Image (cartoon, rainbow, N blue to C red):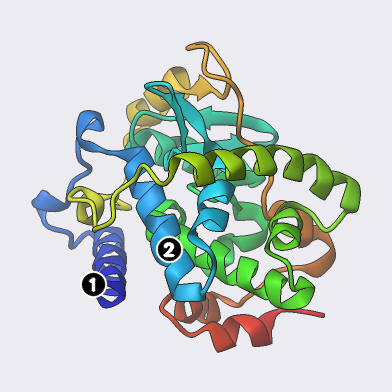
Amino acid sequence: MLQTARKTALRSLLILLLAALGLAPATAALPPAESVQAAEICEYAAATAAAEAGIPAEIMGALTLTETGRRLDGAVRPWAWSVNAEGAGSWFDDPASALAFAEDRIAMGRPNVDIGCFQINYRWHGENFASVAAMFDPMTNARYAARFVRQLYDETGDWRAAAGAFHSRTPANANKYLARFDELHALLRQRGPLGLTSSPETYNQFAVAAPLPEERVRRAREKLTLLGAPIGTPLTGMAGSLAVIGDSRGSLLGVQEGLDAVQGQPSLWASALLP
């Protein structure tokens, strides 16, 4: 299963790179909103990355819920097409809208944008990904986060402490985050995972980095749903999951090292972290 997941992620990255070069086939276009199972894809990516990194599945599951969770049919579930821009979190119906919004903010010189299932911050970590679209890729996003969580566990010897440090190394901020994490962790343990146990059919069609017309960007801005409004779903996401370590510690990995690390070489991750 892990080999299949790795091949899936590599195929997805290849589609992204081909699209960036204008070589992607027409069939690689973004799927319509109704075909994208944003919650299931996040849950699958979290579970797969957890297994690869030796992390309890419920830890990664609770983290993505804390970062991007929204209430769907009475259950709190993560959302892959989530963006937090300067503290204002948004859910989008489809990856194209989320990608357009994030790229638009970055082009405006406002790079403090948290992206995807684990809300990885573009300002501090964007150079470790091939593109903004690659940051949205749920598997790539989850693997990057999982390696950081694993490093934090190796430092602390405690998964809960690692989850708090994932958000912030400042105790007050970590404790505030853990209050929500604990609630969702308990919920996840009680109900079990809701997502897929095998690769989602829509995953390989996730996203392409093809240029988006200005009209698409404008519509994406107009369509965004602020976390907690207006559809009445309670706020569960938290701002800036990985941004906190950026100011004091700088970038975790170089560009090529980052790509190598998410393709299964955790030694590069460990060696690149500063003490």
Q: As shown in the figure, which amino acid type bears the numbered disc 2?
A: Thr
Q: Secondary structure at mark 2?
A: helix
Q: Residue at x 58, y 49 (%)?
A: 63
| Residue 148 x, y percent position in the rendering | 63, 68
Q: Looking at the image, is mark 1 or mark 2 earlier in the sequence?
A: 1
Front position among marks 1 and 2 = 1
For residue 258, say whether it is visible: yes
Q: Residue at x 44, y 74 (%)?
A: 52
Residue 227: name its quadrant.
top right
Q: Say which residue label 2 marks.
A: 140
Q: Is residue 44 left or right of residue 175?
A: left
Q: Residue at x 69, y 37 (%)?
A: 180
Q: CA distance from mark 1 to mark 2?
A: 14 Å
Q: As shown in the figure, which amino acid type bears the numbered disc 1?
A: Thr
Vertical position of residue 43 compared to residue 214: above or below: below
For residue 104, say whether it is visible: no
Q: Which mark is residue 205?
A: none
Q: How many numbered marks are there?
A: 2
Q: Nearer the viewer, residue 33 or 213?
A: 33
Q: Nearer the viewer, residue 147 or 158?
A: 158
Q: Is residue 214 left or right of residue 58?
A: left
| Residue 204 x, y percent position in the rendering | 22, 56
| Residue 189 x, y percent position in the rendering | 52, 46
| Image quadrant containing the N terminus | bottom left
| Residue 3 x, y percent position in the rendering | 27, 77
Callout 2: few (<14), some (14-19), or many (20+) C-alpha neighbours within 10 Å? many
| Image quadrant containing the C terminus | bottom right
Q: Say which residue label 1 marks.
A: 4
Vertical position of residue 17 compared to residue 75: above or below: below
